[in-house]
């Protein structure tokens, strides 16, 4: 059953208090206390723990992003709870952006310790947000979902999580293959910004068909639909109701009635995995900070948009070094344009693959295609396609000392080739059968002699 998409803000408010003393600048988790005094731990999404230097060392960052000399003071002003609620309500979204103390702590994290990472992501968003929006729009999904990669990968297309998820949208291998992304030793399409964005849009749409609520959808994107279903069951224990007046109870004692299942993220919140408890608050905070960054004196990095690109289909094995050396393109640029090729090798002989190049270099590649393929081909592709086995004197034919010391008549079970002739060694079973036949033959001869006498 598909639930209504929008929930009231008051119904979605989690009654949770956050202990400020338990949140340190070097911590990767929050400790929260519910109304009954029980403490729960919320993990920050992994992308919120990435080192800023690793993001700034990406080729696109070093080449096209610069620190902007804006006239903002490097300080984070504070606002009242009512101001945060009012700002969240003004963001033009389909998904609800409810406020509570947990959401506030994630806003504080983004606007405080991670403010320079937000400056980077505001600049890098010019590379990726148009791709995300096109994919989401194609499947008629809320465009605010474009901020999911911020909490998934911090907009790093080569990010790999501690559990093996990869790419901007952090697909696991199984889920990626389910949605058409190829993963092998040479190619990982989870790292392709375009293909992974369309796969993520299809996955999100399928999750909405299951849950009918966008908060549950993005929670399921993080921990899997099975964990969300388990949390829903635990949060909604079966409670039998009295049958209507005049109706008898069932013989089994079940009093019947219709069970009301509440499918709401904040209702099942205590039953979710630790990281997923922080996932939706982090998503709401990401939408807030990417919209109201200027109110927190965060200055976006200035962006120089890269040159337009185009693709050519490669039908032979090709190394990016061949393209870089013959065409004269920086190999780091090639890697940033083609992050799906894990070892700089395009296995075009297996099936045609796309090579993305600056638009101005496509014609040059076509004109010099043979030279590109021939450049250091023997050196870069040195895997042997056929090998000969040195079998003049097979090592397994020589008798060992242990074999020589064995019992007389002991034979090997192996079949060997000696100078082209095949000699089949007798097995123990066959030796026993031969011995039995010999014994039987002797008995027959003995019996025959007795009869003659």
Image: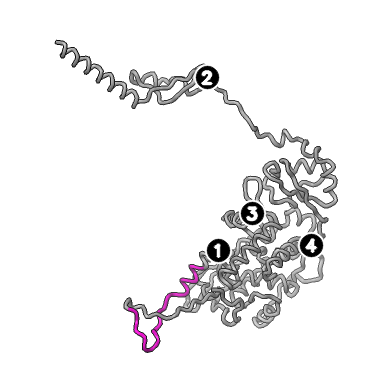
Disc ID at residue 393: 2
Out of 263 and 333, give the one closest to the viewer.
263
Q: Nearer the viewer, mark 1 or mark 3?
A: 3
Q: Residue furthest top?
A: 453
Percent across and percent down for residue 226 are 51, 64
- Pointer 4 residue: 67
Q: Earlier in the sequence, mark 1 or mark 3?
A: 3
Q: Is residue 16 left or right of residue 432?
A: right
Residue on which the image places disc 1: 223
Q: Nearer the viewer, mark 2 or mark 1?
A: 2
Asked whether residue 90 is in view, the answer is yes
- Circle 4/circle 1 CB separation < 8 Å: no
Residue 185 screen position, x and y as percent: 63, 45
Give the mark, 2 or 1, whose residue is nearer the N terminus: 1
Q: Which sits in the foreground, 307 or 384?
A: 384
Instruction: From the image, tell me which residue sits under label 3.
Output: 181
Q: CA distance from mark 4 to mark 2?
A: 70 Å
Residue placed most toward the observer, 160 or 180: 180
Magenta span includes 248? yes
Q: Is residue 301 left or right of residue 396?
A: right
């Amino acid at each position: 059953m598909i639930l209504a998409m929008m929930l009231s803000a008051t119904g979605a408010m989690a009654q949770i208090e956050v202990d400020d003393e338990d949140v340190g600048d070097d911590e990767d988790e929050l400790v929260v206390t519910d109304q009954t005094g029980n403490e729960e731990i919320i993990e920050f999404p992994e992308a919120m723990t990435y080192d800023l230097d690793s993001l700034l060392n990406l080729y696109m960052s070093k080449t096209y992003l610069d620190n902007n000399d804006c006239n903002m003071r490097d300080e984070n002003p504070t606002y009242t709870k009512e101001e945060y609620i009012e700002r969240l309500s003004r963001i033009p979204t389909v998904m609800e952006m409810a406020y509570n103390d947990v959401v506030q702590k994630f806003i504080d994290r983004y606007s405080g310790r991670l403010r320079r990472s937000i400056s980077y992501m505001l600049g890098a968003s010019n590379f990726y947000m148009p791709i995300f929006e096109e994919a989401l729009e194609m499947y008629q999904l809320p465009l605010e979902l474009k901020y999911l990669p911020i909490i998934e990968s911090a907009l790093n297309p080569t990010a790999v999580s501690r559990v093996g998820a990869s790419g901007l949208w952090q697909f696991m291998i199984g889920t990626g293959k389910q949605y058409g992304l190829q993963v092998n030793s040479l190619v990982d399409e989870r790292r392709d910004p375009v293909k992974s964005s369309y796969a993520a849009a299809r996955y999100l749409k399928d999750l909405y068909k299951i849950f009918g609520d966008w908060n549950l959808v993005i929670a399921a994107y993080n921990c899997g639909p099975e964990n969300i279903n388990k949390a829903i069951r635990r949060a909604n224990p079966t409670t039998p109701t009295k049958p209507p007046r005049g109706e008898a109870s069932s013989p089994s004692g079940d009093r019947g009635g219709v069970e009301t299942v509440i499918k709401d993220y904040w209702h099942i919140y205590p039953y979710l995995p630790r990281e997923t408890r922080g996932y939706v608050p982090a998503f709401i905070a990401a939408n807030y900070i990417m919209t109201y960054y200027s109110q927190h004196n965060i200055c976006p990095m200035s962006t120089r948009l890269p040159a337009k690109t185009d693709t050519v289909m490669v039908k032979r094995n090709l190394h990016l070094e061949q393209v870089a050396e013959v065409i004269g393109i920086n190999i780091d640029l090639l890697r940033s344009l083609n992050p799906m090729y894990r070892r700089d090798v395009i296995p075009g002989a297996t099936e045609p693959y796309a090579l993305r190049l600056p638009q101005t270099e496509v014609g040059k590649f076509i004109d010099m295609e043979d030279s590109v393929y021939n450049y250091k081909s023997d050196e870069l592709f040195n895997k042997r396609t056929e090998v000969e086995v040195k079998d003049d004197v097979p090592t397994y034919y020589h008798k060992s000392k242990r074999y020589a010391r064995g019992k007389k008549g002991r034979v090997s079970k192996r079949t060997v080739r000696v100078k082209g002739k095949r000699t089949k060694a007798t097995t123990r079973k066959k030796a026993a059968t031969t011995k039995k036949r010999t014994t039987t033959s002797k008995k027959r001869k003995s019996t025959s002699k007795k009869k003659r006498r």
